[in-house]
Image (spheres, helix red, strand yellow):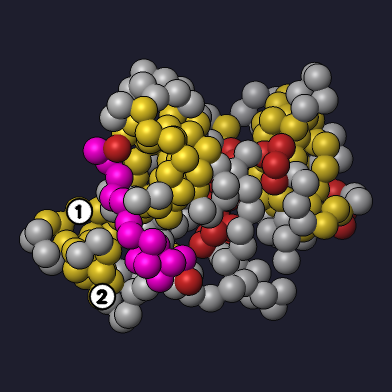
Amino acid sequence: MKNGICTLSVVPIRAMPADKSELVSELLFGELFEVREVVDSWINIKTVYDGYEGWVDIKQCTLLSDDEFEKHLKNNQAVTTELVQIIYNKTNKIYYPVLIGSSLPSIVDTNLCIAGNEYIYEGEYTRELISKENRKIPDVAKQLYNAPYRWGGRTPFGIDCSGFTQLVMKICGITILRDASQQATQGEAVNFISEAVPGDLAFFENEENLIVHTGIILNNQKIIHASGNVRIDDIDHEGIYNGELNKYTHKLRIIRRFI
């Protein structure tokens, strides 16, 4: 089998095939991946959602037949919208949590089947794509307010800056890449901060002029971003101003619009 799916709440993706290796991203329930290489008890994967590559413990993954993989690939638009909800594995009689932004492949009403296991999910989910008349990006972003920062994280229990923007966009039906530097190549450029609208993504550079941070523009010259925790700060043409520290913490490079 050359493909698989995450059937746990969250699975770490590591830089190297070792538990002590750096966390680079995470798989959420229902997310699909391609298997690239197998080394002992580790598999090197490429995620279907964003093309991210890394290593996962084979014990934490469910492999799929080609037919089932193709089926879920065509029917993988449903995304959970509650911070934490319970899913029931009816086959094994096990309850466990799924987190906001998880995928529900091939779900019909409350029922889905993955690798011979029947699941019941009775929480809220969406299949809707965002439109210019439905700017819900800031509202979704605020659901994650105060989530702790964690390098490589993509959940309300630990999330990094680009994981935050990517997860919010996923819930809103917009697919963007994983890292801030990658995301900054997508969408349409906004020339001035005065032209930004809620839902635009702002990107920030370090002293080497590399894009290293991102966040989501809100109303009234505010930005929500993951820095220590998901927080709201002021933003202007220079960058993010942290009122608690009384200083600018991130230098603005570019703003991109995705809707």
Q: Nearer the viewer, mark 1 or mark 2?
A: 2
In this view, the residue farthest toward the left is 93
- Work out whether residue 222 can be spotted: no
In the rendering, at what x and y percent does residue 110 appear?
27, 76
Q: Identify the residue at horizontal 40%, vertical 71% (top origin).
A: 71
- Mark 1–mark 2 Cα distance, whole angstroms, equals 15 Å
Q: Are marks 1 and 2 in contact (CB under 8 Å)?
A: no
Q: What stretch of residues is rendered in magenta?
A: 59-73
Crowd band around label 1 with a 10 angstrom C-alpha radius: few (<14), some (14–19), many (20+): few
Q: Main secondary structure of the magenta part?
A: helix
Q: Identify the residue at horizontal 27%, vertical 64% (top origin).
A: 114
> Mark 2 falls on what kind of element?
strand
Classify residue 204 by image quadrant.
Answer: top right
In the rendering, at what x and y percent does residue 151 appear?
50, 29
Classify residue 56 by image quadrant.
Answer: top left
Quick check: 240 left or right of 229? Answer: right
Q: Nearer the viewer, residue 185 or 209?
A: 185
41 over 236 or under it: above or below: above
Q: Nearer the viewer, residue 115 or 135?
A: 115
Quick check: 67 left or right of 176? Answer: left
